Amino acid sequence: MGKIVAFSNQKGGVGKTTTCVNMAAYIAASGKKVLLIDIDPQGNATTGLGFSKSSLKKSVYNVLIDDERAADNILKTEIENLDLLPSNIDLAGAEVELVYKRSREKVLKNALAEPKEQYDYIMIDCPPSLGLLTINALAAADSVIIPIQSEYYALEGLSQLMNSISLVKQHLNAGLDVDGVVLTMYDSRSLISRQIADEIRKFFTKRVFEIVVPRNVRLVEASSYGKPIMVHDPKCTGARAYKALTQEYLGREAKKGAKSN
């Protein structure tokens, strides 16, 4: 049975989608079968994997609102072992339409019962908000990865984010755990960047991944070309960081598995 991981942060522009797409790609490259679900109406993960949102006739919207099977809406990507349940423009109205659905917070969880048996990892790129789409992702997930930008304003939303996760645990998904916190857009030359990183480490302690993701123009380029960084420029600093981050994550997962056996 696969593990469902939500990438969430209520603040936008923190590298959430970049982290989700690139970790998914590197996990797939390690031989694991991965499904990436783009549940953000902006659809950046969809375009980041080379698909045009405007030309897609089917998406996660059809799964959430029309009760279609997830399997009937999944696309193959150019990365071996990596599939995508995409977002398109229809998803913009899903938040309102979900209000009228029965068990509206658990529509995605119910839809993923079948795919969870077929993938090693299901990774969900959440919107930068705590609406019904994000709540659906957190209700369905086994764990959360939180990308945080190494800048002052990133600290302001931390307590709100953790409170939101706590509420979901309390009312919808008692097993939800925080897998880790990823420091993104890190500039080692900047004093404020180092100070913020220290504050985040104090707040989250061992949950913060040791590998930090630096500011890197090639990561921005890769998104615009619709390719994960491992395809666009596998030797750049951004690619090396995400490869090492993924290895650290899989190492943590292996230790958890060993402890539970």
Image: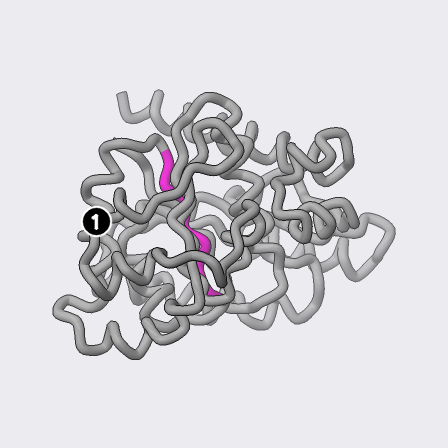
Q: Is residue 110 above or below residue 251?
A: below
Query: For the view shown, which residue lies furthest in the left direction?
Result: 102
Give me the residue at 55% from left, 68% from top: 11
Is 132 on the left or on the right of 237, as rendered? left
Residue 126 part of the magenta-drawn span: yes
Give me the residue at 23% from left, 53% from top: 109
Occupied quadrant, residue 5: top left
Residue 163 place in picture, x, y as percent: 40, 68
**What's the amino acid at mark 1?**
Arg
Residue 254 place in picture, x, y as percent: 42, 24
Write the start and end of the magenta stretch as one range: 121-127
Occupied quadrant, residue 237: top right
Give me the residue at 53% from left, 55% from top: 52
Of the pair 205 and 78, the residue shown nearer to us: 78
Q: Is residue 251 above or below residue 61?
A: above
Residue 247 shows in the view: yes
Q: Is residue 249 above or below residue 128?
A: above
Q: Give the main secondary structure of the magenta stretch.
A: strand
Q: Is residue 162 above or below residue 250?
A: below
Mark 1 = which residue? 69
Of the pair 138 and 53, the residue shown nearer to us: 53
Residue 205 shows in the view: no
* SS for callout 1: loop
Of the pair 241 and 221, the residue shown nearer to us: 221
Residue 226 place in picture, x, y as percent: 62, 47
Residue 39 place in picture, x, y as percent: 40, 59
Of the pair 175 and 120, the residue shown nearer to us: 120
Give me the residue at 83% from left, 57% from top: 191
Q: Residues within 10 Å of mark 1 (few under 14, many from 20)?
A: some
